[in-house]
Image (cartoon, grey):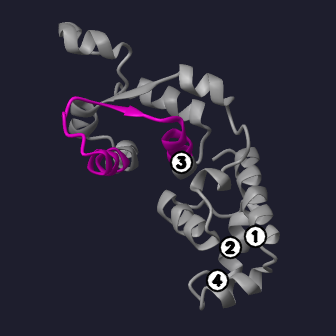
Amino acid sequence: MSTEYSRSLGARLRSIRTQQGLSLQGVEEKSNGRWKAVVVGSYERGDRAVTVSRLAELADFYRVPVSELLPDGAEVKQSEERATKIVLDLEKLYESTSSELGYVARYARAIQQQRGDYNGRILSIRADDMRALAIVYDVSPSELTERLGELGVLVADPRAFFSGGGGN
């Protein structure tokens, strides 16, 4: 996560917490110690990266959708997000020996399980998924997309993939 993105995410977390009338200590007390004040404070300052699963747990604690914890207009406008479709080549992703792709592979498996989508060849990644993954990788969604392209796991034209073009 870039420093700017980290601070924006932290400001969003702080905003949700204060809207609920909670201090950092109040979060720790309300959660019966599950959420330590020092940890939540470090997320809010952008000093500590938050994993996707922890962000989801925090959203559940605050009783808000994960998307509400993400910075507004973090990288692209919603209309632009719809136009940009990220499609992963699952065969290349799962066969890759790059440790850099570990989180993407695990996240893709979780999405497949959640969607019941086991075609095993490609997987569309939604804008919210990319934002969440970008947080884990400590980069912006556009930087993550660029890196996935460099690592060869993006499908340029999904239609060609199924008509014998093979993807990228």
Determine whether 79 is above or below 119 in the image.
above
In percent of the image, x 33 and y 44: which residue is there?
A: 108
Towards the viewer: 99 or 156: 156
Magenta stretch in the rendered image:
107-134
The residue where tag 1 is placed is 17
Q: Residues within 10 Å of mark 2 (few under 14, many from 20)?
A: many
Quick one: SS at disc 1? helix
Q: Are marks 3 and 4 in contact (CB under 8 Å)?
A: no
Q: Which residue is disc 3 drawn over? A: 132
Q: CA distance from mark 1 to mark 4?
A: 14 Å
Three-letter amino acid code at disc 4?
Lys
Q: Quadrant of residue 105?
A: top left
Label 1 or label 4, whichever comes before in sequence order: 1
Q: Position of residue 165 (x, y in %)?
A: 23, 8
Q: Secondary structure at mark 4?
A: loop
User: Dot 3 surroundings within 10 Å: few (below 14), some, or many (20 or more)?
Assistant: many
**Where, by quadrant of the figure, is residue 32 drawn?**
bottom right
Element at badge 2? helix
Q: Amino acid at mark 2?
A: Val
The amino acid at mark 1 is Arg
Circles 2, 1 touching at the beta carbon (< 8 Å): yes
